[in-house]
Amino acid sequence: MRALYERAGFAWVGRSAVVHGSQAWYEMRWTPSLPEPHAVPPGVWEALQSQGVAGRRRAAGTLLLDFQNGLVDVAEKEGGGTPRNRYPLLCSNCGSLILSKGVGALTERESVQMEPPDHTHPKLAALRAPPAHIFWWLVTPSPMEFENIGFSKPVNTASEKPLKLLACAECDLGPVGWCEPGGTEFWVSCDRVSYRT
Ligand SMILES: [Zn+2]
């Protein structure tokens, strides 16, 4: 049977230590060929990379909905004034620092439809549609107050005037807020950033 096994890829080893019956036994060995190191099956890199993203997401702060008391937990009043952000605001995707602690004023105002309905980025919270009121971090008077932020060109939204939309300067996740072109008020959705506690 030796020739049969050799044609099937087995290599001759020699006489076996196995004793069974009256005839000698011989040992042959087949070694499976391993894939080349670079021959990574399709989809594996993607899976590894998505795990990396998940790891960064864990480092990207806490979303508002994960605080037990919601806005009460992320705002603090200093000296009886307007409540301000108790924690630095981060991009909820990559963790990039958007706004330092205490710079945004917690403000309730009408919602703004920043993107068409059903086109919200899957990593961003869906906001209630106008005229419902929602909470924002109001930043004034200039973009210099931000640590890192990106602006779109003026875009037409459901609002009366074109708006500039705010997005993460590092990974472009957005819109996280808006402003009027040339305006002095920058509105960041409390639900679309995370908080570095
Ligand atoms: Zn980002």
Image (cartoon, helix red, strand yellow):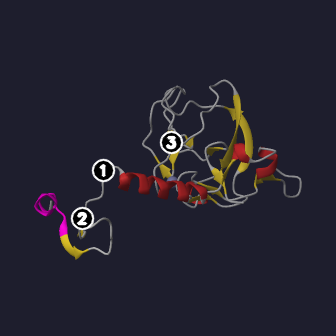
Q: Main secondary structure of the magenta part?
A: helix
User: Residue 50 appears at what percent x and percent y?
Assistant: 45, 52
Q: Residue at 56% across / 44% down in the picture?
A: 176
Q: Earlier in the sequence, mark 3 or mark 2?
A: 2
Q: Which residue does the image show at 19% across and 64% down from the upper left?
A: 10
Q: Tell which of 105 and 5 is nearer to you.
A: 5
Q: According to the image, label 2 marks what residue?
A: 30
Describe the element under mark 2 as helix, strand or loop.
loop
- How far apart marks 1 and 2 lie (CA) works out to 27 Å
Look at 70% across and 34% down and name the residue there: 134
Say if disc 1 is inside 8 Å of ligand 1: no
Crowd band around label 2 with a 10 angstrom C-alpha radius: few (<14), some (14–19), many (20+): few
Q: The residue under label 3 is which amino acid type?
A: Leu
Q: Which residue is mark 3?
A: 165
**Figure disc tally:** 3
Instruction: Determine the CA span between mark 3 and mark 2.
Output: 63 Å
- Residue 160 part of the magenta-drawn span: no
Locate residue 78, reporting x and y percent.
Answer: 85, 58
- The Cα–Cα distance between marks 3 and 1, rounded to whole angstroms, is 37 Å
- Residue corresponding to mark 1: 42
Q: Over which residues does the magenta segment extend? A: 2-11
Residue 169 appears anywhere in the view: no
Q: Secondary structure at mark 1?
A: loop
Residue 4 among those drawn in magenta: yes
Residue 156 horizontal side relative to residue 39, left or right: right
Relative image position of residue 182 (x, y in whole percent): 52, 45
- Give the mark nearer the N terminus: 3 vs 1: 1
Q: 96 or 109: which is nearer to us? A: 96
